[in-house]
Amino acid sequence: MVDDLEEKQSDTIDVQHYLRLAQRRQFHFLIPLFVGWLVLWGMSWVLPPRYRSGTLILVEQPTMPRDYVTPNVSDDLQERLQSITQQILSRTRLLYIIDRKHLYGDAHASLTPDEKVERMRKDIDIELVHDPQGRVNAFNVYYVSRDPHVAQQVTSEITDLFINENLEVRQHHSEDTTKFLEGQLEAARGALEAQEGRIREFKSQHVGELPAQLESNLQILSGLQSQLKTDEDALSAAQQQRIYLQTLVDQYRTLRVSSSAGDGMQDGLPAVDQELDRLKALLADLSSHYTDRHPDVRKLKDQIAKTERMREQLLTELHANTSNTPADSHAQAPALAQLQSQLQSNQAEISNRERSIEQLKVKVSQYQARLNQEPVREQQLADLTLGYDQSKATYDDLLKKKNESAMATSMELLQQGERFRIVDPPSLPVKPDFPNRLKFCFIGLGVGLALGTVVAGAAEMADDRLHSETEIKKLLPVPVICEIPVITGPRDGQIPDHEGWGRWTAAALVISAILAGSVFSYLHG
C-alpha cells in the first residue's frame, strides 16, 4: 500500500523537489540572469543611436474632372513611384546630397563614394499606403541618421525630390505624348492628302463618267435625243421644202418659155397652198411642244410668211398675165430670183441640219458611252473612297486625341494634374529608432532567463550529492522500514537563517535592478 502511494507520488510533479532545487541553485540562476540582462541592456546604451525621421506624402487627384480633361499620363501610380524612386536613389542624386549635407564623414571617412551611396540607400525607406480598394493613395518617406536634425533635413530633401520629380516626370511624359500624337497626326495628314490627290486625279481623268454625274448625264442625253429628233424633223421639213421650191423654180422656168403662162401659174398655185397648209400644220405641232420664242418655231413662222407672200405674188402675177402681153414676161424675173434665193437658203439649212445631226449623234454616243462606263467608275471610285474614308477616320481620331493630349499637357504645366502634397512634415525624432533600449531590456531578460536555466541545470547535473529522502530510497536495494526524524535542540530555532535572508536579498536586488533598468529605458530610451 505504501509502495503504491509512493509510485503515485513519483508520477506526479514534485513541486517541493523543484522548490528545493531553485533554493539550492538560486545563485546559479540569478547571477547568469543578471549578467545576461546586464550585457544586452548595457549594449543598448553603448551602441551608437540612430534616429529615424519620416513624412507622409498624399497623392492628390487632378483638380480638373476627367469628363473635361483626360490625363495623358499613366494611371499606374505604383509603377511611376518605382521609376521616380530609382531616379532619386541614383548615384548622382545621392552623392549630391551626401556632399552637401556632409553625410558619413567622420565615422565613415574610409568609405568610398559607392559605399556611401549604398549605405544611404539602406538608410532610406519608402513605404506605400493603400486604401481599402488596394490603390496607392499616399506613401511615407523615412531616413535614418545618428543626428536627429540631419535625419529631418535629409528627409525633407528627399521629400522635395519626390514632389519635384513627380511634376517633371508627369510634364515630360505628357509633352512626349503630345509630340508623339502630333507626329502621328502629320503622317495621317500626309496620307489623307495623298488619298485626296488620287481622288482628284481620278475625277479629272474621268469627267462625266462619275456616279455623281449620272443624273446630269441622263438629263443631257435626254435633251440631246430630243434635240436630235427635232433636228431630224426639221431636216425632213427642209428637204420637203427643197422639193417644193425646186418644183416652183422649174415651173417658173417653164412658164417663161411657155406660151400659155396663165395655165402654168394656175398649176403652181395649188402646190403653194399645199405647202402653206403643211407648214401651218407643222407650226401647230411645234407650238404644242415649244414656246413662240423657240428658234424652230420662229423660223417656221418666217417660212410661212414667205410662203404667204409668194402665194400673194403668184396671185398678182396670175392676174397680171391675163391682161398683159408676152412682152411683159420679163416682170417674172424677180419672182424667179427670189425662189432661187430661197432654194439656196434651203440648201444651206439642209447642210447645217445634217452637220448638226451628225454632231448630236456623236454627242449621244459619247454620253451613252459615259453611262456604260459609270458602273466601272463607281467601283473604282468606291475603292479609292474606302481608303480615303479610313485615312479620314484615322486623321479625325488622331486630331481628337492630339487636342485632348494638348489640353492635358496644359493642365500638367499649370500643375493642376495629379500631384504630391506633404501631409505630415518631416519629423524631428526625439528617441532613437535603434537601438530600442526597452526592447533590448526585454531581450536581455529573456536571454538571462535562458542562461540562468542552463547554468542552474548544468550545475545540478554535475552535482553527485543526494539532497532528498527520495533519492536515498531510490539507491537502497531494500525498502525502508522506518525513518528517524531530525532531532533539534532548544537553541536550533533561535539561530537566524542568514543564508535564506541572503538569497531573498539577492533575488530582490536582481529583480529591482531589472525593473529599474526597464523603467529608465522606457523614459530615456
Image (cartoon, rainbow, N blue to C red):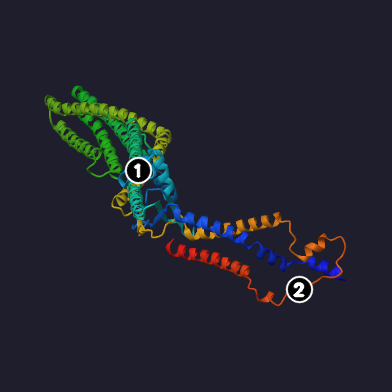
Q: CA distance from mark 1 to mark 2?
A: 87 Å
Q: Helix or strand or loop: what does disc 2 sit on? A: loop
Looking at the image, residue 418 lies above or below residue 388? below
Q: Residue 127: image x %, image y %?
A: 45, 53
Element carrying mark 1? helix
Q: Which residue bears the numbered disc 1?
A: 93
On screen, residue 109 versus residue 346, left or right, reads right
Q: Are marks 1 and 2 in contact (CB under 8 Å)?
A: no
**Residue at 78% of width from left, 72% of height from top?**
485
Q: Callout 2 environment at 10 Å: few (<14), some (14 to 19), or many (20+)?
A: few
Residue of label 2: 487
Q: Residue 209 got which mark?
A: none
Rendered position, 109 above or below 462: above
- Residue 85: x %, y % from top left: 40, 46
Toward the viewer: 415 or 33? 33
Asked whether 156 or 435 is in front, the reply is 435
> Considering only order in the chain, which callout, 2 or 1, is on the residue closer to the N terminus?
1
Of residues 12 and 194, the one nearer the viewer is 12
Q: Quadrant of the C terminus?
A: bottom left
Q: Please tell me how crowded label 1 is: few (under 14), some (14-19), or many (20+) other residues with Cα within 10 Å.
A: some
Q: Is residue 61 visible?
A: yes
Q: What amino acid type is highlighted by mark number 2? A: Ile
Q: Nearer the viewer, residue 107 or 148?
A: 107
Q: Relative to residue 364, is residue 500 depicted above or below? A: below
- Name the image quarter holding the N terminus: bottom right
Picture coordinates of residue 126, whole percent (x, y):
43, 51
